[in-house]
Amino acid sequence: MRPFPKFFIAFAVLSLWLAPVSHAHRFYAAFTQIDLRDKTQSIEVVHRLFTHDVEDYLRSKLGNSSSLTDQEIEPVLQEFVEGSFALFDGAGNRLPLTWVGMEYKTDSVHIYQEAPLPENPKEFTIINRLFMALFDDQKNTVNLEWNEKIHTRIFTKGNAQQKVSFKEAD
């Protein structure tokens, strides 16, 4: 009887080791970039949501959504984002985020919003509950950028509201 070649044994051991990894739990995340633009006196918001999470949300909301058109899906996602994400100025006033649109990529959905830049944009409160009602492990990352300074916040269930300050001491 011929012994197994060494590469076969190494491959078998590696396969057994990697098998649990291939069935690993997927992570739940969303990413938001908020840019404060002095030149245009505007706030630009881009949400990057993973396509599989958007599909799970649409299924939970609409049932089988595979036959729906973009025109039918967009208002559902707009209501979802506007109900799950908010931005407040330093005085506690909710900023009126206007829906600009959305685009599908292979693995993500990009959603665009904008608002006028408040007069004194030194402090903001962000609420980000995107997908938190659907996934207990959801983690949402928000980057807020102004004058080349970036503040990053991670939002989780129970920690969906956070402040960001651009005061001189930062």
Image (cartoon, helix red, strand yellow):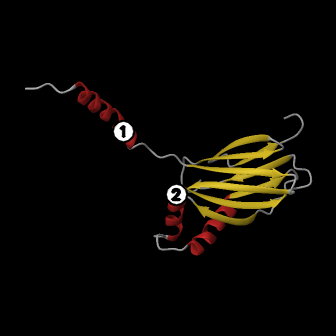
Residue 78 lies, in percent from the top left, at: 65, 67
Residue 130 lies, in percent from the top left, at: 63, 55
- Decide: few, some or many residues near mark 1? Use Cα within 10 Å; few <14, some 14-19, many ≥20: few
Residue 106's disc is 2
Mark 1 / mark 2, whichever is N-terminal: 1
Instruction: Look at discs 1 and 2 and give the one toward the viewer.
Output: 2
Q: Residue at x 24, y 30 (%)?
A: 8
Residue 114 lies, in percent from the top left, at: 77, 61
- Asked if 71 appears above or below 40 in the picture, the reply is below
Q: Quadrant of the C terminus?
A: top right
Q: CA distance from mark 1 to mark 2?
A: 26 Å
User: Is residue 123 shown left or right of residue 161?
Assistant: right
Q: Secondary structure at mark 2?
A: loop
Q: Quadrant of the N terminus?
A: top left
User: Label 2 near label 1: C-beta < 8 Å?
Assistant: no
Pick whichever, 11 or 88, lies toward us: 11
Q: Residue furthest right?
A: 119
Q: Secondary structure at mark 1?
A: helix
- Asked if 87 appears above or below 27 in the picture, the reply is below
Q: Kindly identify the amino acid type of the residue bearing the numbered disc 2.
A: Thr
Residue 38's disc is none
- Decide: few, some or many residues near mark 2? Use Cα within 10 Å; few <14, some 14-19, many ≥20: few
Q: Residue at x 59, y 55 (%)?
A: 49
Q: Residue at x 49, y 70 (%)?
A: 65
Residue 11 lies, in percent from the top left, at: 28, 32
Q: Which residue is mark 1?
A: 20
